[in-house]
Image (spheres, rainbow, N blue to C red):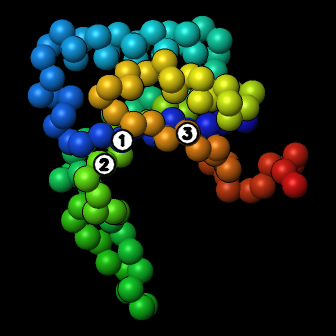
Amino acid sequence: MHYAILIYASEGFFDRLPEDEQERALDQHRALQKELNAKGTLGAVAKLMDTSAAMTIRKQGDNLLVLDGPFAETKEQLLGLYLVECESIDDAIEQAKKLPQDVAAYEVRPIGWIGGSVEQPADAD
């Protein structure tokens, strides 16, 4: 099954860290990416731009509104993500634990569908 590892932190926090701490954190990301890539279970990895570059599309009545900014107003923003293939959510959690815990929080969430189709997989309940 595929899982998303979502990366949350306050914008700019990482950039304010000393360079050696930034490099240590990036080394942990590189190590996980190398490990998952070697196993063939690494999907997309992305660092998102700041929420100031985000746009939200929301329906209001019969109209679609395009609004500046992120979907939610929170202290921490979604900054990036991993898409990984794991045997179970416990395995996905173990992979997320390998990331630098002192610079971000990580949410692990199962993915209902992936790719170009929103059809239910054949093995879904």
Q: Which residue is mark 3?
A: 108
Which residue is the site of mark 2?
A: 77
Mark 1 burial class by Cα count in 10 Å: few <14, some 14-19, many 20+: some
Task: Give the Cα distance between marks 2 and 1.
Answer: 5 Å
As shown in the figure, which amino acid type bears the numbered disc 3?
Answer: Val
Q: Is residue 55 visible?
A: no
Residue at 18% x, 53% y is 52
Q: Residue type at mark 1?
A: Tyr
Image coordinates for residue 14, horizontal then vertical, percent:
21, 29
Q: Secondary structure at mark 2?
A: strand
**Residue 120 shown left or right of residue 74 in the figure:** right
At numbered mark 3, what does the secondary structure look like: helix, strand or loop?
strand
* Quadrant, the C terminus: bottom right
Classify the position of the N terminus by image quarter: top right
Which residue appears at 29% of the width and 58% of the height? 74
Q: CA distance from mark 1 to mark 3?
A: 11 Å
Label 1 near label 2: C-beta < 8 Å? yes
Q: Which mark is residue 8?
A: 1
Given the image, on which type of amino acid does mark 2 rest? Gln
Task: Please state the horizontal and vertical placement of residue 58, each as a whole percent of the image.
Answer: 38, 74
Mark 2 or mark 1: whose residue is earlier in sequence: 1
Nearer to me, 83 or 11: 11
Above-or-below relation of 73 to 112? below
Q: Is 48 placed left or right of 91 in the picture?
A: left
Image x and y of residue 4, in percent: 55, 38
**Nearest the eye: 92 or 101:** 101
